[in-house]
Each structure stands twice: as structure tokens, then as C-alpha cells.
Amino acid sequence: MGVRTALALLPVVLFATGGASAAPPIGVTAAARSVRPGELVVLTIAPPAGTTSLHVRAFARDIPAFKVSGRTWRALVGIDLATTPGTYKVAIGTGTGENAASTTYPLVVHPRTFATRTLTVDEAFVNPPSEAVAQIEHDTQTLNRIWAASSPTKLWDGPFVRPVPDPANSRFGTRSVLNGQPRSPHSGADFLSPEGRPIKAPNAGRVVFAGPQYFTGNTVIVDHGLGLFSLFAHLSRIDVHEGDTIATGDIIGNVGSTGRVTGPHLHWSVRVNGARVDPLSLLATLGH
């Protein structure tokens, strides 16, 4: 795929609640491309035998955990691109009662400098016309509802794959200054794909949005479950419908240049429990 990167394996943490009758410890390991803003960290957790539910909380958000096999559980922790460097505690617990166990995992987020580009463009690309304000507000409300309503069940199956074979040509997190005005950071990866290139679903999930938006044009959003979403923007054609269940590799549409863009390309954004994460980090941690 061209994006596979050696993952950093972070230390194992073992913790047991105090006392002679303390519950068995919880083992925690973490793997990530790097531990910086915009990255995905995959926690592998080994709770006491017989654990039926696991609670994980990081960055003031509840993180769904899923059982892999036996005593092996995992949780996806996204580090939002706006996260301030520092040490953050990931709280992990197995519930309440005599057999309850808990621990905290110290996640050290290192600094990351995002690129900044200064451009002079047509004023229409800087300040939308007044007649578009209502649509922009509606689009924002729609997205917020979607991000808050992920399936409680893991829907993805197997490794994630690239949606197009073309290289990414725009760095995640890039800050743009358009006509002297700072814009929001770029929260996805752009792939320099030709008009009409088929776009493959990077993994299984359910289509939760398929239609136009002001900024992203023809847009498809796939819920992979447990707070993990993919958003694909600027499509020339949409081949799926809201509510569709899709498998890895299914065609969801074609590359285009709809919305607020100057040329054809694929924009792919990833959200992990509200955190804006580089899609290439997702491919590096959960890809082939």
C-alpha cells in the first residue's frame, strides 16, 4: 500500500488494586505510528479472566473496548489534531464489585508541528455568500448528529485498505491562510486521483450519509462502528445510499471536484470517537 510504517510499541503497564485480596492486574500495551496530535493509538488490554465488560476513558471521552479473543481486548484511542502535548491518563476498569480491577495508562503525547500554507485565492473561497449560511449551519448540525450516533457494535472486519491507489498529496493538519485569513486545519488526507476514479470502501460498515454538503460537495460517510467513521468528499458520483451495509472494497462512488475545491481529488477524513485522526495513521495501525 505504500503507507505501512513500523509501529512504536509502548511499555506494558500492570496494575492491581491494593490489598491482599486485590483483583488480578490489568495488562496494557499500546501500538502507534507515533504518539502525536492526529494519530491513532491501539491499546491491547488483558483484563482478569472472566471479564465481560471493559470501560476505557481518555481525553474526557468514553472509548468503546471490544473483545478480540480470550483475555485480549482492544480500544482505539484517537489523539485529536488540536491536542496539547503532555501526559494524559487513560483510565481502564472492569466494572464494580469484589472482582473489579482498574488501572491507568500514561499516554505521553509528543509535540507535532503542522505545515502552514499562505495562498491568495478568489474571495468566494474565503467567505461564503450570505445565502449559503443556512446550508452551512444545517450541514454542521447533520455532521454533529452523525458523529454522536455510532453503532455500539464493531462493524469493520479485517485490515483497512486504501480507497484509491493514488498517493496522498496534502499533509493532514495543514493550516491555510487564505487572503490573510486563517482557516480551520485540514482534517483529512487528499489523494491526487483523476476524475472518475472508483472509490473503494476502506473497510466494512454502514452508510450514514450520502448526499451533498456545501464545503465537501457530494459526500459519503461510513460508520465502521465503535465511534470510528470515514468521510469521503468531493465525489462526482455517489453509488451508495444511506442505510446501506457495505463490505471492504465495495465501490461507494467516483472521484470528482464537487464542493469548495479547485480540482478533482479524493478527500478522506477519519473520526475516532470525536478525534480528528490522519487516515494514513489508521492505515498504518490497522491496515495490511
Image (tube, rainbow, N blue to C red):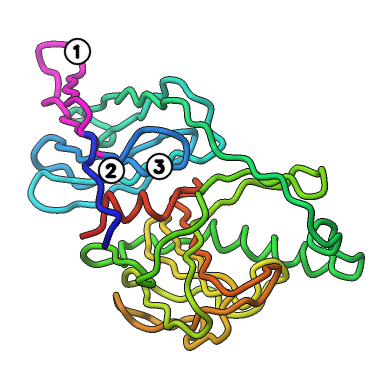
- Residue at 71 percent across and 68 percent down: it is 260
- Neighbor class of circle 1 (other Cα within 10 Å; few <14, some 14-19, many 20+) is few
- Answer with mark 2 or mark 1, whichever residue precedes in sequence: 1
C-alpha separation, residue under disc 1 versus residue under disc 3:
34 Å
For the residues carrying marks 2 and 3, which lies nearer the camera in this image? 3
- What residue is disc 1 on? 18
- Answer with mark 1 or mark 3, whichever residue precedes in sequence: 1
- The percent position of residue 77, horizontal first and vertical second, equals 37, 42
- Let me know if residue 20 is in the magenta part: yes
- Position of residue 238 relative to residue 128, above or below, is below
- Residue at 45 percent across and 20 percent down: it is 86
- The percent position of residue 107, horizontal first and vertical second, equals 35, 26
Q: Please, what secondary structure does the residue beneath circle 2 have?
A: strand
Quadrant containing the N terminus in the rendered view: bottom left
- What residue is disc 3 on? 39
Q: Please, what secondary structure does the residue beneath circle 1 have?
A: loop
- Neighbor class of circle 2 (other Cα within 10 Å; few <14, some 14-19, many 20+) is many
**Amino acid at dot 1:** Gly
140 sits to left or right of 282: right
Q: Nearer the viewer, residue 208 or 162?
A: 162
Quadrant containing the C terminus in the rendered view: bottom left
4 sits to left or right of 145: left
For the residues carrying marks 1 and 3, which lies nearer the camera in this image? 3
Q: Please, what secondary structure does the residue beneath circle 3 have?
A: loop
Region in magenta: 9-31
- What residue is disc 2 on? 42
